[in-house]
Image: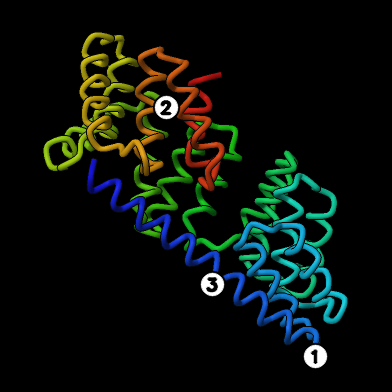
Amino acid sequence: MIRAWILCSGILAQTLNAHEDLNSVIRSLSQKIRNSPTAELYYQRGIEYRAAREKLHARTDFQSALKINPTHQAALRNLALLHSQAHEHKQAIAVATALLDTSPSPQTHLLLADIFYTAKDLPNALKHVQLSPPEEDHTHLLHAHLLQDDEQVVAQLKRGHEITKSIVLRNAWIDALIATENSKTALPIIEKELTSSRFRASWLIRRARVLRSQNQKEAAKRDLLEALTELQKRISPTCPDLTLIYDRGLAYALLDRKKEAQTDLEILTQSRFSPLSYQLLVTLLR
């Protein structure tokens, strides 16, 4: 507990120092803009405003940069993201499409895939994610999420892991196997991890999901309670690891402790975690 308090106190001090540093940089950039405004200077100040969570000022600066240089790629990207985060979908799509015209890169296609997904235009999101960078975890996670057929989801995540060798995609593939009740493939991997891993909670939760699908409810409950015991020891009350909050939410949901699971989901939705990272918890609570 003392160590967690010291760590979070250090983070708070760093945050306060960082905020003062941001203000100093913003003042310096403002002086330069007054002397000789350029698209790059407006863009740089917009980034600082965004880091300071002053989104309105950030948007104004990105727009100012684009008035001077309409093809400034970084300003276009950041302005599109701000529109999307504000659920201004038409504006976000228009700005991102303008970026695609100047930079038809896989990264721009991934940006458009995210924007169309946020706008709930799933066919266009799928079209663009298929042109997104294959080395990125997010490409494969989003692609799998957009697919309707369970077997295609499993295949997409497996293919993504084979390309990237990413642990994130490997675990997502195992979760998809469990969801499709393919325990013959998933369970041996889970059991191996349970014997070799120092921290077992996430693997206990995965085994519990398999056991539940096999109607072994008491065995599943034992695994979930053991996972919760471990997680409660590992989760700092003042500075929690969000991946552990997600695991705890899953355990609560699977134990039908919906109120506690919903509390953990709310923590995740208010964080900067990608919604794709906690989609399973959302599904369990529907």
Residue at (66, 74) in percent of width and height: 26
Q: 205 or 64, which is in the foreground? A: 64
Of label 3 and label 2, which has the lower sequence position? 3
Q: Quadrant of the N terminus?
A: top left
The residue under label 2 is which amino acid type? Ala
- Under tag 3, what secondary structure? helix
The total of numbered circles placed on residues is 3
Q: Which mark is residue 36?
A: 1
Residue position marked by numbered label 2 in the rendering: 179
Q: CA distance from mark 3 to mark 2?
A: 47 Å
Percent coordinates x, y for residue 139 in the rendering: 54, 54
- Under tag 1, what secondary structure? loop
Q: Quadrant of the C terminus?
A: top right
Locate residue 11 relative to residue 134 in the image: left or right.
left
- Under tag 2, what secondary structure? helix
Residue at (27, 30) in percent of width and height: 232
Locate residue 147 relative to residue 31 in the image: left or right.
left
Q: CA distance from mark 1 to mark 3?
A: 23 Å
Q: 238 or 280, which is in the foreground? A: 238
The residue under label 1 is which amino acid type? Ser
Q: Is residue 140 above or below residue 73?
A: above
Q: 106 or 239, which is in the foreground? A: 239
The residue under label 3 is which amino acid type? Asp
Locate residue 74 relative to residue 216 in the image: left or right.
right
Of label 2 and label 1, which has the lower sequence position? 1
Percent coordinates x, y for residue 262 in the rendering: 49, 23
Q: CA distance from mark 2 to mark 1?
A: 58 Å
Residue position marked by numbered label 3 in the rendering: 21
Q: Residue furthest right?
A: 67
**Residue 58 position by quadrant:** bottom right
